[in-house]
């Protein structure tokens, strides 16, 4: 974040008899020159070919990466409380009093909205809502609950999610997805997602070695995490049911098929690996 203004109001207390302490800080944050480049490596393989006609719709990862190259942030009423005493682990509580708004390059917007619970705390599960959309970006509504730090490992974060999304991300076009479950950020820099029940996915088309149309299926948890993202890329594995699709180039149709699916990123390629057993 550049050109950032922070207004702070706070108070603190220290008791010398037992080493007890407390700190409370409220702040307003404003920044007009933020930048995030964490998607750039993934987006590089999805960049439109300048020699060919413009691709419509634009790939969602590429569009989001461009939108995050410059953004402004407004967050009012961010409150942080820290307390503890000698021999005991510190207690903390982070709350947002009003929605934090990130205005993205090109007109899109990311909003983080608070609830009656803290966003994250040491002794209470956190909860907040995220909404992303506008300007050709993926349309995402995400609710996060029971968010917090692993009591046995301060470098592990986890929580429950409830997701609804509409997007165009290769190899899918005109895709819509719903699902809920648990997510974990591990101390090995991996992001994991599980499914509590069947998730649902539809797509107008998919490029999976063959051109597929009118894709619809239910997805459920297998033995391991349904979704994993780490240094080697993304990986999806699980069970599918009620699969329907058509492959017009092969005069092939499926209806209510079920089986096992595994899909994964291939480094240096925008085409995914895919294995499916019907």
Image: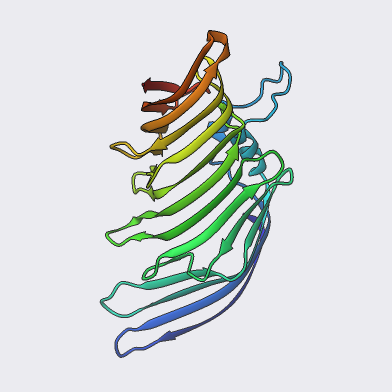
Left or right placement of residue 267 versus residue 131 in this view: left
Residue 96 location in percent, x, y? Answer: 56, 68
Residue placed most toward the observer, 16 or 87: 87
Task: Say whether residue 269 is visible.
Answer: no
For image coordinates 65% across by 36% down, the residue present is 63
Residue 65 location in percent, x, y? Answer: 61, 38
Is 248 placed above or below 227 here?
above
Residue placed most toward the observer, 67 or 192: 192
Q: How is the image coloured?
A: rainbow
For image coordinates 70% across by 45% down, the residue present is 134
Is 204 placed above or below 7 here?
above
Furthest residue toward front: 256
Task: Say whether residue 87 is visible.
Answer: yes
Left or right placement of residue 54 versus residue 262 in this view: right
Residue 146 location in percent, x, y? Answer: 40, 61
Where's the C terminus, which quadrant? Answer: top left
Furthest residue toward bottom: 17
Furthest residue toward top: 250
Residue 122 location in percent, x, y? Answer: 37, 68
Residue placed most toward the observer, 31 or 271: 271
Q: Quadrant of residue 68?
A: top right
Q: Quadrant of residue 78?
A: bottom right
Is 94 placed above or below 47 here?
below
For image coordinates 66% across by 24% down, the residue present is 48
Where's the N terminus, which quadrant? Answer: bottom right
Q: How many numbered marks have been drawn onto this rendered protein structure?
A: 0
For image coordinates 66% across by 38% down, the residue present is 66
Left or right placement of residue 276 versus residue 272 in this view: left
């Amino acid at each position: 974040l550049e050109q950032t203004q922070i207004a702070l109001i706070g108070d603190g207390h220290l008791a010398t008899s037992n080493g007890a302490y407390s700190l409370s800080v409220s702040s307003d944050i404003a920044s007009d020159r933020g930048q995030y480049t964490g998607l750039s490596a993934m987006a590089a393989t999805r960049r439109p070919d300048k020699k060919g006609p413009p691709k419509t719709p634009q790939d969602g990862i590429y569009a989001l990466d461009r939108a995050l190259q410059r953004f402004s942030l407004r967050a009012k009423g961010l409150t942080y409380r820290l307390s503890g005493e000698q021999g005991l682990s510190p207690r903390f509580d982070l709350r947002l009093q009003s929605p934090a708004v990130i205005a993205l390059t090109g007109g899109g917007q990311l909003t983080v909205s608070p609830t009656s619970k803290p966003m994250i705390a040491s002794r209470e599960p956190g909860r907040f809502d995220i909404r992303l959309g506008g300007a050709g970006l993926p349309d995402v509504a995400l609710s996060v609950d029971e968010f917090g730090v692993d009591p046995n490992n301060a470098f592990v974060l986890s929580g429950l999610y409830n997701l609804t999304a509409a997007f165009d991300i290769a190899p899918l076009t005109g895709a819509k997805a719903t699902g809920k479950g648990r997510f974990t950020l591990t101390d090995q820099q991996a992001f994991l997602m599980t499914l509590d029940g069947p998730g649902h996915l539809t797509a107008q088309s998919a490029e999976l070695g063959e051109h597929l149309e009118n894709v619809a299926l239910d997805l459920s948890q297998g033995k391991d995490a349904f979704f994993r993202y780490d240094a080697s890329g993304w990986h999806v594995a699980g069970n599918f049911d009620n699969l329907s699709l058509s492959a017009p180039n092969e005069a092939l149709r499926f209806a209510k098929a079920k089986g096992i699916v595994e899909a994964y990123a291939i480094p240096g390629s925008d085409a995914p690996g895919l294995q499916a057993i019907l």
